[in-house]
Image (cartoon, helix red, strand yellow):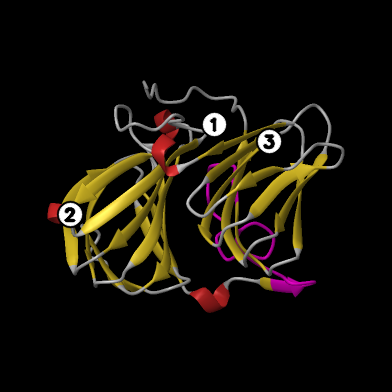
């Protein structure tokens, strides 16, 4: 098993609306400074925070499956399908861009979110009609055991069941001194962003754990056998957002140059 820890200095960064919105990007676009620009079909991952009310005007998307996850505050979404909806903490908005649409975002001060792009087979995706769906926080399953709370964003029991891209997503909170165990099958990659807390460790049985801090991006790539990825909160309570995808897919991916 291979484990990488990438600090904020090895991730991309971008500002929007004159610096009102700042995004740290574990996976950004080429030329934005990220050491890693994609993981399999996980094309883009931005962690945005608004210091003041602001927004991003109408802009186009095509082909990709684009998810926005509310972490704090409120944001207004509008699109050319005629949608207007409010994204709050814990909600997910999903755009399956298909043949194309445009959307705009307006956010309050203190708004915090992820935007995540997943790449299906684009040649087929652009033939489908675009869709937008808002999923409320209460509709997602959660489990709490031994100091670990797991909210399943995409996976067993989730209301998000029509994604084309092969992906699993979890919002995990780990109390200090507790451990979360994630079963990683062969040929799969796990990406984790630490959004709250310091003093975490990630590893597997028989392997020396690697430490990480708040804002670090952890990448865990499995070997030829199933393994348990162990994430432990040693210093503080941790909150991590985890995305699991296939390391490779059977269709051609967009050429995203570094």
Of circles 1 and 2, the one toward us is 2
Observer-nearest of 124 and 143:
143
Pointer 2 residue: 19
x and y percentages locating residue 227 in the rendered image = 82, 40
Image-based side of 86 in relation to 197, left or right = left
Magenta stretch in the rendered image = 143-168
Residue lying at the far right in this picture: please name it.
206
Q: Secondary structure at mark 3?
A: strand
Count neighbours of disc 2 (C-alpha within 10 A) and say few if under 14, some if 14 to 19, many if 20 or more.
few
Observer-nearest of 161 and 36:
36
Name the residue: 19% across, 51% down.
16
- Counting residues from the N terminus, which is met first, the one under dot 2 or under dot 3? 2
x and y percentages locating residue 243 in the rendered image = 58, 48
Q: Quadrant of the N terminus?
A: top right
Residue 227 in the image: above or below residue 145: above
Pointer 3 residue: 188
Pointer 1 residue: 40
Count neighbours of disc 1 (C-alpha within 10 A) and say few if under 14, some if 14 to 19, many if 20 or more.
some
Q: Secondary structure at mark 2?
A: helix
Name the residue: 34% across, 56% down.
48
x and y percentages locating residue 80 in the rendered image = 20, 57
Q: Distance from label 1 to label 2 (Cα)?
A: 30 Å
Residue 99 seen in the figure:
no
- Counting residues from the N terminus, which is met first, the one under dot 1 or under dot 3? 1
* Callout 2–callout 3 Cβ contact below 8 Å: no
The disc placed on residue 93 is: none
């Amino acid at each position: 098993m291979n484990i990488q820890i990438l600090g904020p200095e090895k991730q991309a960064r971008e500002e929007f609306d004159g610096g009102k919105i700042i995004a740290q990007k574990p996976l950004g676009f080429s030329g934005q400074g990220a050491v890693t620009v994609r993981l399999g079909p996980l094309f883009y991952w931005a962690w945005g925070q608004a210091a003041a009310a602001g927004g991003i005007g109408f802009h186009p998307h095509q082909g990709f499956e684009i998810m926005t996850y509310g972490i704090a505050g409120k944001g207004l979404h509008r699109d050319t399908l005629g949608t207007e909806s409010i994204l709050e903490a814990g909600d997910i908005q999903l755009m399956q861009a298909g043949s194309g649409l445009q959307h705009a975002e307006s956010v309050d001060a203190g708004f915090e979110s992820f935007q995540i792009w997943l790449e299906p087979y684009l040649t087929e995706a652009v033939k489908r009609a675009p869709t937008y769906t808002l999923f409320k926080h209460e509709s997602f399953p959660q489990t709490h055991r031994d100091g670990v709370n797991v909210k399943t964003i995409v996976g067993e029991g989730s209301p998000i069941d029509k994604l084309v891209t092969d992906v699993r997503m979890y919002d995990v909170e780990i109390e200090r001194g507790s451990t979360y165990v994630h079963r990683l099958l062969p040929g799969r990659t796990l990406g984790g962003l630490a959004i709250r807390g310091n003093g975490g460790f990630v590893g597997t049985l028989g392997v020396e754990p690697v430490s990480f801090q708040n804002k670090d991006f952890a990448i865990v790539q499995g070997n030829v056998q199933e393994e348990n990825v162990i994430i432990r909160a040693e210093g503080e309570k941790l909150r991590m957002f985890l995305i699991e995808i296939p390391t490779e897919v059977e269709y051609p991916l967009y050429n995203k140059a570094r």
